[in-house]
Image: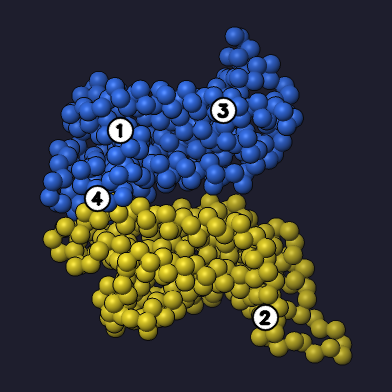
């Protein structure tokens, strides 16, 4: 594997090298990033006003609908991160770059982690934008400045987990078109959750059932709690817990998928 | 005329054949409206309890009409994607060279869009009926709703085909999709116009999609409103978009 006389670079250096390439590629195609960042904001602007009548439903939290909805752009942004991460990796697989990289001393774990560098940069930038837009439109963060920082950390962790989903899909299918086609299925997880109304106000029983067992509900409620309730230990524990679980699960499955792909190639 | 008809028939057949034979194209176009129906009718049904919300057929029916018309608009948008893909693959250029009447190309893609929506609209309707949706409109009124849907599909398809022919790349997807998406969602999607407040009320009031949506909901609820106005708006939209599509075709012809 390693040329004689040359020591293998440290794992962190390997991750850094792959991540640098991923970040540069992301920056170079920034025109393609405008839509994923803008789309959640457009939906936030429209739904924040169009659904404001929902605050008149008995039992709705005593906050504006915009404040209630602010968690959703973070989740939608994370879904776009999943697609970006998946499509980028799929493109590397399709072009043969992935196989050539596999023949170098770079470890599979470094390839996996480094590939997510660019999408994570996007996640961090879009999270800051969503937060600024939310505050600029009059949404107060009930948990204060500290809460805003925790919100950013949670949203980036969620995006990291979703990037793992995109990576897994790319390794499994090896095609950018297939990753894109899975996007509606990812999007549905957001629809079938407590994104538009609190779970206790979901009247239709099957929808309430699905939303209760949908991890997306807890990710949204984790972010939402920081905006509308302040420090809610249970909501935060569930939010961070599910985000971490998704990350660990997708990275674990991606490692297996990568091993299989490398054995095949 | 015969040349026009043969090109139209060929392009329409290819368009619907490709849709049915390509799961990665067909499945999302069917799943998206179903997701919207499930999310809006299921997740937001409590909205019907907002004071001043009156829709006799119920919230599922209220949302069904929106999703039905939205799916017709997106049937047109997805056809634009197919046109863009045909340009990327080089097929569209060969088609331009070989078609004895190029106007038939637009007509063929437009018919393909309607057939594509027929498939999606049927699935959405069946799903809504299974979910227990009430249908209050009479047979004639439901045919009227179908007519509104077909006109929406025609306007959206002509917009999408024209734009795809101007830009001639799959990367035009966002440009094709975004205006339709914004216009559709700036109508009273979740509650009637009288329950909207602030800037969204002002925008929705003058949005032509609002008239179309209100007419559709009225027909479905056996209380027709603004039906003639909706058809006039859609006919005007179709005329403008037909000119747009024709110019798109001319642009593609010039590009060779």
- Circle nearer the viewer, 3 or 2: 3
Question: Is residue A261 in view?
Answer: no
Q: Are marks 1 and 4 on the same chain?
A: yes
- Circle nearer the viewer, 1 or 4: 4
Label 4: which secondary element: loop
Residue A6 position in % (x across, y down):
84, 88
- The residue identified by callout 2 is A16
How far apart marks 3 and 4 lie (CA) works out to 36 Å
Q: Relative to A175, is A58 on the left or the right?
A: left
| N-term-proximal mark, 1 vs 4 | 4
Task: Return the chain for callout 3.
Answer: B
Label 1: which secondary element: helix
Q: Are marks 3 and 4 on the same chain?
A: yes
Q: Relative to B99, is B152 on the left or the right?
A: left
Label 3: which secondary element: helix
Of the pair A195 and A178, the residue shown nearer to us: A195
Label 2: which secondary element: helix
The disc at residue B197 is 4
How far apart marks 1 and 3 lie (CA) works out to 24 Å
- The residue identified by callout 3 is B245
Q: Residue at x 30, y 54 (%)?
A: A49
**In this view, A74 is above or below B35:** below
**Chain B tint in image:** blue
Q: Residue furthest right?
A: A5
Question: Is residue A255 in view?
Answer: yes
Q: Residue at x 45, y 79 (%)?
A: A153
- The residue identified by callout 1 is B211
| N-term-proximal mark, 3 vs 4 | 4
Pointers 3 and 2 in contact (CB under 8 A)?
A: no
Of the pair A198 and A2, the residue shown nearer to us: A198
**Chain A tint in image:** yellow
């Amino acid at each position: 594997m390693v040329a004689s006389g040359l020591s293998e670079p440290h794992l962190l250096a390997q991750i850094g090298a792959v991540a640098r390439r991923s970040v540069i590629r992301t920056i170079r195609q920034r025109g393609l990033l405008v839509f994923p960042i803008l789309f959640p904001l457009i939906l936030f602007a429209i739904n924040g006003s169009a659904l404001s009548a929902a605050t008149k439903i008995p039992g709705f939290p005593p906050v504006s609908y915009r404040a209630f909805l602010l968690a959703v752009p973070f989740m939608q942004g994370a879904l776009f991160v999943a697609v970006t991460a998946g499509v980028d990796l799929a493109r590397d697989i399709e072009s043969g770059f992935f196989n050539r990289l596999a023949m170098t001393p770079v470890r599979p774990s470094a390839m996996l982690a480094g590939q997510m560098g660019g999408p994570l940069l996007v996640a961090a930038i879009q999270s800051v934008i969503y937060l600024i837009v939310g505050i600029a439109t009059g949404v107060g963060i009930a948990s204060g400045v500290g809460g805003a920082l925790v919100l950013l950390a949670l949203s980036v962790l969620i995006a990291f987990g979703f990037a793992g989903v995109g990576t897994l899909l790319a390794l499994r299918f090896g095609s950018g078109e297939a990753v894109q086609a899975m996007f509606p299925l990812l999007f549905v997880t957001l629809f079938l959750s407590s994104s538009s109304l609190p779970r206790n106000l979901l009247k239709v029983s099957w929808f309430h059932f699905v939303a209760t067992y949908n991890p997306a509900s807890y990710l949204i409620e984790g972010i939402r709690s920081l905006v509308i309730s302040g420090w809610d230990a249970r909501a935060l524990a569930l939010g961070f817990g599910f985000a971490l679980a998704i990350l660990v699960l997708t990275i674990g499955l991606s490692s297996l998928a990568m091993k299989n792909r490398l054995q095949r190639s | 005329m015969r040349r026009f008809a043969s090109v139209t028939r060929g392009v329409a057949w290819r368009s619907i054949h490709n849709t049915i034979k390509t799961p990665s194209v067909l499945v999302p176009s069917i799943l998206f409206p179903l997701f919207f129906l499930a999310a809006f009718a299921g997740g937001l049904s409590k909205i019907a309890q907002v004071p001043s919300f009156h829709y006799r057929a119920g919230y599922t029916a209220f949302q069904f009409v929106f999703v039905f018309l939205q799916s017709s608009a997106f049937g047109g948008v997805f056809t634009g994607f197919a046109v863009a893909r045909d340009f990327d693959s080089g097929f569209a250029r060969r088609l331009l060279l070989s078609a004895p009447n190029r106007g038939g190309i637009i007509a063929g893609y437009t018919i393909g869009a309607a057939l594509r929506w027929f498939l999606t609209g049927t699935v959405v309707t069946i799903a809504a009926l299974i979910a227990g949706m009430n249908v209050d409109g009479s047979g004639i009124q439901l045919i009227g709703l179908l007519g509104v849907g077909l006109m929406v599909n025609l306007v959206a398809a002509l917009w999408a085909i024209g734009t795809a022919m101007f830009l001639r790349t799959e990367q035009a997807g966002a440009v094709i999709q975004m205006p339709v998406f914004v216009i559709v969602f700036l109508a009273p999607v979740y509650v009637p116009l009288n329950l909207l407040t602030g800037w969204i009320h002002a925008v929705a009031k003058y949005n032509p999609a609002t008239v179309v949506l209100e007419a559709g909901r009225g027909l479905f609820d056996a209380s027709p409103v603004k039906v003639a106005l909706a058809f006039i708006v859609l006919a005007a939209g179709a005329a403008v978009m037909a000119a747009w599509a024709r110019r798109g075709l001319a642009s593609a012809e010039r590009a060779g």
